[in-house]
């Protein structure tokens, strides 16, 4: 049997580099274990094991759940895009180059003006550390791909399998694709109501006044006409109110 070869300097250096690289984290898929909506932070489980080569062979190790990971939402100019986060949701973990603790706790703030942000001291030489990720929601594997597939033509916002908004090149559809009816617009509805009102204005005096059509044979209104005049006489003519939404507009 051949005796095992003693490692030379190159082997030692190579192993040292590999050991160090095993501690350099860049990007991993993750799963939400818990979420604090007020703090926008999550406890996240990385979904790929750490793999190292040792003198005894390959070593596989489960990475621990990382607590208090900041969840990053698209946000700029006072606007935002947010979604409810639930246990089990997937995300992308991006591990920062330096410690983000000082930045995250607001130590870079200068006064109350939120635009006055300065660079912060990382306070440690750690780089790409397991404790310094941020989470971007939505990295699912192939077995969990959206079904049906995303729309090939429209931008779609909403709940999978539920109410959505389709934004196409020249048409916006609410709730689902292929909506059958157009949304009524207040000004156009008001115009049509005014047409109906104009017609009722013309015949209202005839409807509510004393009947002028005499019953054949006796020269006076019939009992039915008289009763109808009394009934209509207590009816108030309706006015037109513009049926407009107060927070939603369309053209």
Image: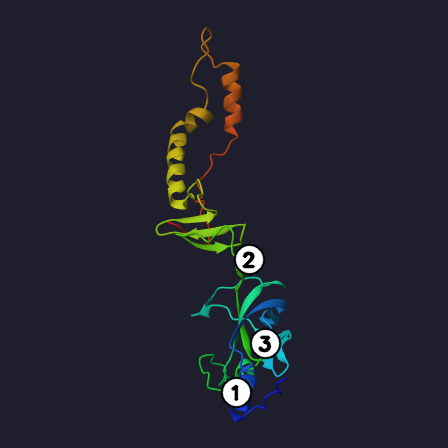
Q: How is the image coloured?
A: rainbow
User: In the image, which is nearer the foreground, mark 3 or mark 2?
Assistant: 3
- Residue 125 or 2: which is nearer the viewer? 2
Q: Position of residue 174 (x, y in %)?
A: 46, 48
In the image, residue 83 lies at what x, y percent?
54, 62
Image coords of residue 245 (percent x, y): 46, 50
Dot 3 or dot 2: first in sequence order is: 3
Residue shown at the point (53%, 93%) measured from the top left:
9
Distance between the alpha carbons at the discs numbered 2 and 1: 37 Å
- Tell me the distance, in whole angstroms, between the alpha carbons under discs 1 and 3: 16 Å
Residue for point 51% across, 19% down: 226
Residue receiving disc 2: 143
The local crowd at label 3, few if under 14, some if 14 to 19, many if 20 or more residues have their Cα within 10 Å, is: few
Determine the residue positioned at 51% across, 90% down. Answer: 10
Which image quadrant is residue 35 in?
bottom right
What is the number of the mark on residue 226? Answer: none
Which residue is situated farthest in the left direction here? 170
The one nearer the camera, 48 or 37, is: 48
Mark 2 or 1: the one toward you: 1
**What SS does tag 1 mark?**
helix
In contact (CB < 8 Å): disc 1 and disc 3: no
Which residue position holds label 3?
51
Mark whose residue sits in front, 1 or 3:
1
Mark 1 / mark 3, whichever is N-terminal:
1
Dots 2, 1 in contact, CB < 8 A? no
- Taking the view exactly as shown, the residue that stands out farthest to the bottom is 9
Residue 196 spot, x, y in % from top left: 40, 33
Instruction: Please tell me whether mark 3 sits on a helix, a strand or a loop.
Output: strand
Q: Which residue is mark 1?
A: 14
Q: Residue furthest front?
A: 1
């Amino acid at each position: 049997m051949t005796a095992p070869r003693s490692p030379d300097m190159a082997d030692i250096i190579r192993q040292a580099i590999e050991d160090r690289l095993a501690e350099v984290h860049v990007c991993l898929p993750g799963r939400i274990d818990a979420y604090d909506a007020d703090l926008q932070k999550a406890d996240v489980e990385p979904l790929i094991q750490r793999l190292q080569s040792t003198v005894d062979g390959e070593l596989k190790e489960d990475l621990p759940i990382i607590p208090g990971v900041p969840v990053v939402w698209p946000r700029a100019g006072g606007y935002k895009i947010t979604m409810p986060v639930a246990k089990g949701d997937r995300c992308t973990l991006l591990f920062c180059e330096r410690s983000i603790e000082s930045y995250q706790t607001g130590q870079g703030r200068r006064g109350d003006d939120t635009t006055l942000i300065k660079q912060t001291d990382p306070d440690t030489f750690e780089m790409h550390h397991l404790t310094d990720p941020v989470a971007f929601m939505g990295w699912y594997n192939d077995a969990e791909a959206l079904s049906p597939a995303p729309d090939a033509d429209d931008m779609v916002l909403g709940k999978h399998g539920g109410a959505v908004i389709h934004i196409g090149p020249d048409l916006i559809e609410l709730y689902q694709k292929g909506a059958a009816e157009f949304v009524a617009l207040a000004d156009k509805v008001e115009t049509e109501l005014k047409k109906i009102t104009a017609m009722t204005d013309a015949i209202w005096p005839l409807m509510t006044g004393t009947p002028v059509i005499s019953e054949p044979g006796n020269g006076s209104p019939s009992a039915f006409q008289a009763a109808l005049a009394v009934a209509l006489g207590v009816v108030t003519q309706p006015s037109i109110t513009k049926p407009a939404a107060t927070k939603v507009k369309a053209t």
